[in-house]
Image (cartoon, helix red, strand yellow):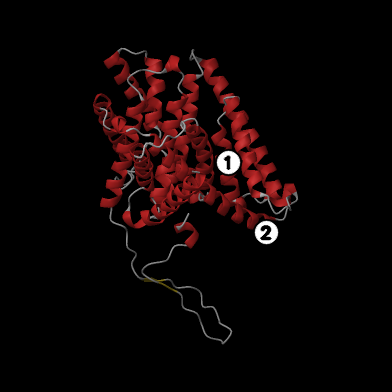
Amino acid sequence: METIVIIVLCILLLLAYVFDITSRWTKIPSVILLLLSGWIIQQLMTFLSLKVPDLSPILPILGTIGLILIIMESSFDLKLHKSKISLINKSFLGALFPMIMLAFFLAFLFSSLKGYSFINSLINAIPFCIISSAIAIPSIKHLPEEEREFIIFESSLSDILGILFFNFITLNTVFNLNTFGRFGLDILIMLVISLIATVGLAFLLNKIKHHVKFFPIILLIVLIYAVFKVFHLPGLVFIMIFGLSLANLDKIKQIPRLMNVDTAVLEKEIVKFKELTAEATFMIRASFFLLFGFLIKTEEIFNLPSLAYSFIIVASIILFRIIQLKISRLPLIPLLFVAPRGLISILLFLSIIPAQSIPLVNRPMVIQVVLLSALTMMVGLILTKEPHGEQTIINEPETPTPNGEQMIIEETEETEEPQNQVEQ
């Protein structure tokens, strides 16, 4: 039996790898294929009358670790520059205001239609208002760089701001100036601790000489996040600061000098660390969605009482996104469709305590919204034409070769992407 389980797991993860590679050409988000694969395995096991222990407690653990790795991996790809201030501002506003407006709109809808308290309705609405970086980021490899960077910034910030918003509402019963002041102080403390922790982890990355060094650092990052979570501090802020610091080491070289470390050696170690993080992220993300698909019941997908509300929620997501993109003067296509709900929505839904849950927002509704938003993104990306570059010649300064000849550099019509980016 153990051998069969190992064979099935290996086949499924290899399939996940194929899905990830081919998504650039098929434009089908790998998460849809992973969910489908997990569901098919469940149907086969039911048909063969094979019993499996309850795996649902593993889902939040995989989801939390996956969220940490996804935010960190996406932060590694973000290069900060003065020219990108406008893009960052648009991403921040695009992540914050539509989320808040949509949350209050859905809360009003739930409370007015069913008579639930507005606070409980708001708590249950927030998971539907957060863009899933776990689904959005792996699905945009074929988009132009500026649009890709916007989605990385927007979805990562949406995860962080969404968790902050959710924790703020769930952990407070009274909302006044003292509440907001204490919340602001927590954020400030979080920023200071994050900077200190980032410096310490970078120091370890440079100084550890043992052949096993990256995995312990990942464990330390997960541990720091978990400790922050115990004290209800926004641990994802630390994750993003850590990733951005390593990605933009060339702009903060005074920190390596303060730590008395060799910048050149540290940069090489960071490259290796990024590669390991990408590998680990793929494994955890694929495992999470395969398991989630395995735990989905067919009757939950076609639950008619919740299906109508799910369509209303997805339609509301699209409507508020149109307003956001118009105000930010960003192109509707394809950004309009890239607003999936997924891992973070599931995790927040699972974390709602019984006293704050409402019967309307149930497991079938969460599953339906995740699937409908992912299918909407898939259709939008399929209908989006991939940009084609035009042949251009870049006039470089004349550089003599060893034979005294001059080099002329031409940029061809298509430039092959780095292999590690395609297979990430």
Tell me the crowding category of disc 2: few under 14, some 14 to 19, or many 20 or more residues within 10 angstroms, Cα based.
few
Q: Which of marks 1 and 2 is nearer the N terminus?
A: 1
**Image marks 1 and 2: residues in contact by CB distance under 8 Å:** no
Q: Position of residue 8 (x, y in %)?
A: 44, 48
Q: Quadrant of residue 47?
A: top left
Residue 198 disc label: none
Q: Position of residue 11 (x, y in %)?
A: 44, 51
As rendered, which of 134 and 175 lies closer to the eye? 134
Q: Distance between the residues labelled 1 and 2?
A: 21 Å
As rendered, which of 359 and 8 lies closer to the eye? 8
Q: Position of residue 46 (x, y in %)?
A: 35, 36
**Mark 2: which secondary structure?**
helix
- In this view, which residue lies farthest toward the right? 260
Q: Where is residue 202 in the image (x, y as percent from the top left)?
A: 67, 47
Give the amino acid at mark 1: Ile
Q: In which quarter of the image is residue 304?
A: top left
**Mark 1: which secondary structure?**
helix
Tell me the crowding category of disc 1: few under 14, some 14 to 19, or many 20 or more residues within 10 angstroms, Cα based.
some
- In this view, which residue lies farthest toward the bottom? 403
Q: In this view, does 345 lie above or below 338?
A: above
Give the amino acid at mark 2: Ala
Residue named by callout 2: 264
**Residue 180, visible in the rendered structure:** yes
Report the number of discs.
2
Q: Which residue is drawn at 32% across and 20% down?
A: 360
**Residue 143, visible in the rendered structure:** no
Residue 241 disc label: 1
Q: Which residue is drawn at 56% across and 54% down?
A: 275
219 displayed left or right of 122:
right
